[in-house]
Amino acid sequence: MHQFISMLFSLLVITGLQVSESTGTRSERSIDRSYRSELTVPNGGRWGSWGPREMCPTGTYAVGFSLKCCCCCVKVEYRTLGDDTALNGIRLFCIDASKVSNSIRDYASVQSSVGRWGVWTVIKWCRPGLLTAFKLKVERPQGDGDDTAANNVLVQCSHGPSLVGEGTSWGEWDYWSNTCEGKGICGIQTRVEESQGGGDDTALNDVRMYCCD
């Protein structure tokens, strides 16, 4: 009986998660969508390899983003005794540009490559407006120390103030990327280092974003 109840509870939890994750979202992506310009920053980390380019569905643009960070880094202000990875992923949330408003109910998400550690942070929305530029906070190589590479991201909204992610504190901000040629950001590509086993892990190192008309 106890085993049956446990299995039933697990089924209910899984079902609830599936419902909550599917509400208000669309999973389709437009990987081959054409773009007008590519945005890069000069201070990205050097480790890892570039993942696939992921584009918002045709006709939609990024209006929000969320970060995946090492949970122990997000939850503490001091350095841990273990291997810190800091930023692990960036997820863009895309909606129809004609429907940008303070009420966002129907959106799709894209994310490219993502590291294995951490939890997703809360979504930061441009209200109203589209994402048009970004900059990275990156820690320089530490030699024999613990490297974390990318630690946080800051994005510019077409209407309104910039939005900073809930990343970690190590490293320094560098220059902004160029501003979008076109309507707004519509895709992302990330450079991520895979798990190094017993070595020093850095996870996300660099980002490219794409702009569409």
Image: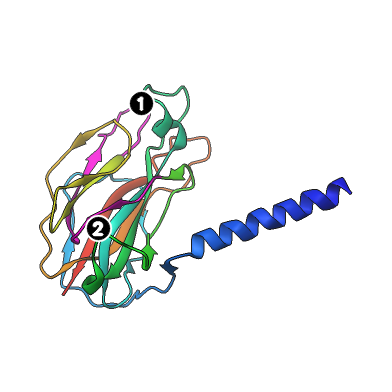
Residue 13, how many percent across, how many down?
65, 53
Residue positioned 36% across, 26% down in the render: 144
* Nearer-the-camera pick, 149 or 155: 155
Q: Quadrant of residue 95?
A: bottom left
Mark number for residue 208? 2
Residue positioned 10% across, 67% down in the render: 181
Residue positioned 48% across, 42% down in the render: 196
Residue 130 located within the stretch drawn in magenta = yes
Residue 31, how many percent across, how many down?
35, 74
Q: Residues within 10 Å of mark 2 (few under 14, many from 20)?
A: some
Q: Quadrant of the C terminus?
A: bottom left
Residue positioned 17% across, 50% down in the render: 41
Residue 103, how many percent across, how many down?
30, 61
* Nearer-the-camera pick, 103 or 15: 103
Q: Quadrant of residue 210?
A: bottom left
Please report the bounds of the magenta region as a residue range. Answer: 121-149
Residue 16, how many percent across, how many down?
60, 57
Magenta segment main secondary structure: loop
The residue lying furthest to the front in this view is 103
Mark number for residue 144? 1
Position of 11 relative to 37 (above/below): above
**Residue type at mark 1?**
Asp
